[in-house]
Image: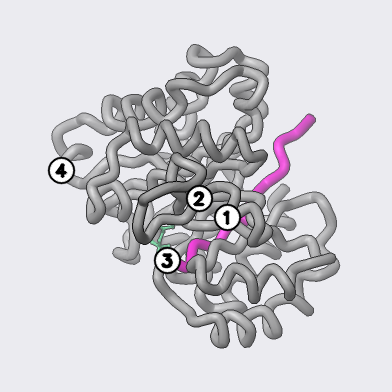
């Protein structure tokens, strides 16, 4: 089975639920006829999930959260759990985003516990990995990516591994307008697939989708999509504009 490509938007801490409604009204008519050949996933802030769930019901658009806690409930002020995001209609959850790792000091061990819990609830994790500029300049890209990947997947049974999506997001390319070259992205993504083959097996590794993220735009998205190893993109800034996200989804559909 060929891997189904993904066009995913990470809104980060942007848009109230009223603004999300306006987005859905512009976005949905343009993408509602997209069939199963690609998956379009929108990851808004928690507060807009319920609104978007009602717009996207009976549409091909899927919803994702941007984070969750590894426990299901309890005394964790300010946190949100897997059953809660599931109830909001999330089929995906972004975990280990570099902003969570670097600004909020999330560790790879914590990310691993979250990946495991998401899978237990039938939510597909989008596990983000990527090196900082300093790490890249020190020649540590593979070391960092491998460590984040293996700790993020430390307790995952083979039977559930194919539902995981990996996003390679070099930190220096996020929000900077300086995307990685498609060759660079392909190189690291091939390395990730090789590591997934040894962590699981070649067949499972061949089923796992690996995305590129970092300054993806309607203008450069095709460069990444042309690479066989890259199964789609995780888009930040450009995904906030429904017209740009529609274009990225169209290019994704065209490229595969
Ligand atoms: P930008 O597309 O704004 O660089 O953000 C990428 C990202 O962090 C997606 O998760």
Which quadrant is the N terminus positioned in?
Answer: top right
| Residues packed near mark 2 inside 10 Å, few (<14), some (14 to 19) or many (20 plus) | some
Q: Against 144, is 4 above or below?
A: below
The residue indicated by pointer 2 is 81
Q: Name which of mark 4 and mark 3 comes first in the sequence.
A: 3
Query: Which residue carries the number 1 mark?
Result: 84
| Mark 1 burial class by Cα count in 10 Å: few <14, some 14-19, many 20+ | some
Compute the Cα span from label 2 to label 3. Answer: 18 Å
Front of the two marks 2 and 4: 2
Which residue position is annotated with label 3?
A: 12
Closer to viewer: mark 1 or mark 3: 1
Q: Secondary structure at mark 4?
A: helix
Q: How far is disc 4 from disc 1 in space, using C-alphas?
A: 37 Å
The answer to whether 182 appears left or right of 145 in the picture is: right
| Callout 2 touching callout 1 (CB < 8 Å) | yes
Q: Percent from the top left, x then y, of residue 114?
A: 45, 38
Nearest to the eye among marks 2 and 3: give it.
2
Front disc: 4 or 3: 3
Question: For numbered disc 2, what is the local secondary structure?
Answer: loop
């Amino acid at each position: 089975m060929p891997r189904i490509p993904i066009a995913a938007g990470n809104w980060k801490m942007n848009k109230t639920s009223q603004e999300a409604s306006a987005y859905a009204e512009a976005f949905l008519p343009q993408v509602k006829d997209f069939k199963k050949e690609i998956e379009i996933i929108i990851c808004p802030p928690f507060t807009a999930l319920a609104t978007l769930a009602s717009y996207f019901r009976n549409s091909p658009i899927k919803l994702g959260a941007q984070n969750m806690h590894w426990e299901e409930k309890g005394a964790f002020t300010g946190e949100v759990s897997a059953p809660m995001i599931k109830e909001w209609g999330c089929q995906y959850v972004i975990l280990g985003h570099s902003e969570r790792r670097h600004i909020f000091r999330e560790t790879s061990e914590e990310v691993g516990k979250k990946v495991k819990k998401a899978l237990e609830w039938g939510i597909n994790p989008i596990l983000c990995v990527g090196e900082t500029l300093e790490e890249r300049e020190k020649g540590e890209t593979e070391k960092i990516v491998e460590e984040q990947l293996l700790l993020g997947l430390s307790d995952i049974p083979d039977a559930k591994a194919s539902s995981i999506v990996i996003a390679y997001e070099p930190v220096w390319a996020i929000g900077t307008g300086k995307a990685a070259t498609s060759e660079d992205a392909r190189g690291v993504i091939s390395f990730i697939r090789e590591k997934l083959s040894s962590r699981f097996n070649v067949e499972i590794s061949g089923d796992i989708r690996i995305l590129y993220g970092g300054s993806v735009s309607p203008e450069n998205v095709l460069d990444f999509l042309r690479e066989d190893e890259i199964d789609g993109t995780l888009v930040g800034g450009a995904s906030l504009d429904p017209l740009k996200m529609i274009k990225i989804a169209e290019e994704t559909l065209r490229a595969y």
